[in-house]
Amino acid sequence: MNNDLPTPSSEAQAHSEKLVAYIREAMQGGSISFADYMQQCLYAPGLGYYVAGSQKFGEAGDFITAPMVSSLYSQTIVQSIMPTLKETDGAILELGAGNGQMAADILLFLQQQGDTSTEYYILEVSPDCQAQQKQTLEKQVPDALVRVQWLQRLPEDFKGVILANEVLDAMPVHMFRYQKQELLERRVTWQEDSFAYIDEPMQDEVLRLAIAALPLTQDEKQDYISEINLTLPVFVRSLIAKLQQGLIVFVDYGFLQDVYYHADRNQGTLMCHYRHHASSDPFLHPGLQDITAHVDFTKVGEVAMHCGLQVSFDSQAEYLLSHGLLDLAVTDDEKQQLVYSQQIQKLVQPHEMGELFKVMCLEKK
Ligand SMILES: C[S@@+](CC[C@H](N)C(=O)[O-])C[C@H]1O[C@@H](n2cnc3c(N)ncnc32)[C@H](O)[C@@H]1O
């Protein structure tokens, strides 16, 4: 990853300009919250990053997620949830299934274990991602397609396991700034020929209260920029309400609040990805780059405990290693062994995905 972003094609630029016009219309010459800006950049109908048909995932796209690193990843995850699937006699519901690689690997692994009956549901907000998921499954596990259903909304009284791999980081966040003891909302406006931040006195009371509940110290209030996901508690609560019995597994990059909102992290965690280049500028090529923020796992855990669920929290490395990742990689084929060991490094090494990525499991009944 570096900051020399490649130039998009003229077709891609024209697409971005359409989204810019769409967002500017919503601004009506003023400003919008960063969360509204991010929502439109990622999900504006027909125009947003996840909704329009660009290549997002994999080597030819913008970023790679753990299911694309190795099928061992999804195999380990499914191995870890098998006891719950058996106990609840339940199904799997995957949220935001991206290009469908995790679904394909899970269904294939279940088949290999003799399980051809577990149902697989996918809830995906992007029609473009849904189409990619169908393609992947048709190609890799055609026999299992009969067990897969795409849902428009969360099912009632769900029993089994809800999986969300890198979904929470793709949700819009509000931005804020403490400057000379004053709390400002970091909003988005149009200046000359591009979008730009504008820091305005905080007027949103819900946002003010949510920020007041964060463990920020007086020091941090000197000049401190960060972000907060106001939808997160509502989203987690809605999943818990629909889960009658079973497990919710979130895997994502993120921190507990003491680390997330530490004084040293005074620029927040906002990150954008375009063609495997990382930048912190969300105004470059609107609609063509992914925009993400780290996940506040303290908030997820608090909501779950408040609802009476049991919570476990591990680094990705701890979780995968304690659920049999290495055993799954045992093979007599030396070439394959080498490939596996490179993939395992990527999944568990602290400087790769091992430490930054966390696994939070919420268990109900
Ligand atoms: C970063 S991608 C991760 C894709 C995939 N899970 C993976 O790990 O490769 C985020 C995915 O979440 C989806 N998404 C975002 N918000 C969602 C929501 N509220 N419900 C369901 N899916 C959502 C996006 O459309 C996209 O498919």
Image: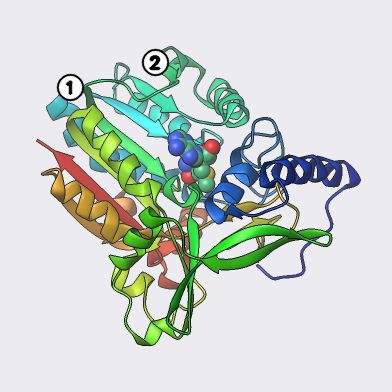
The residue singled out by tag 2 in the image is 147
Above or below, comparing residue 104 to residue 227 in the picture: above
Q: Earlier in the sequence, mark 2 or mark 1?
A: 1
Snapshot quadrant of residue 279: bottom right
- Locate residue 257 relative to residue 275 in the image: left or right: left
In this rendering, does residue 174 appear at all? yes
* Image quarter of the C terminus: top left
Query: Disc 1 residue type?
Result: Asp
- Locate residue 295 relative to residue 266 in the image: left or right: left
The residue singled out by tag 1 in the image is 89
In the picture as drawn, the residue positioned furthest to the right comes out as 10
Residue depicted at x 48% and y 57%: 174
Determine the CA span between mark 2 and mark 1: 15 Å
Q: Nearer the viewer, residue 208 or 162?
A: 208
Above or below, comparing residue 50 to residue 70 in the picture: above
- Secondary element under disc 1, as helix, strand or loop, is loop
- Disc 2 crowd rating (10 Å Cα; few below 14, some 14-19, many 20+) is some
Residue 56, x across and y down, in percent:
65, 44
- Secondary element under disc 2, as helix, strand or loop, is helix
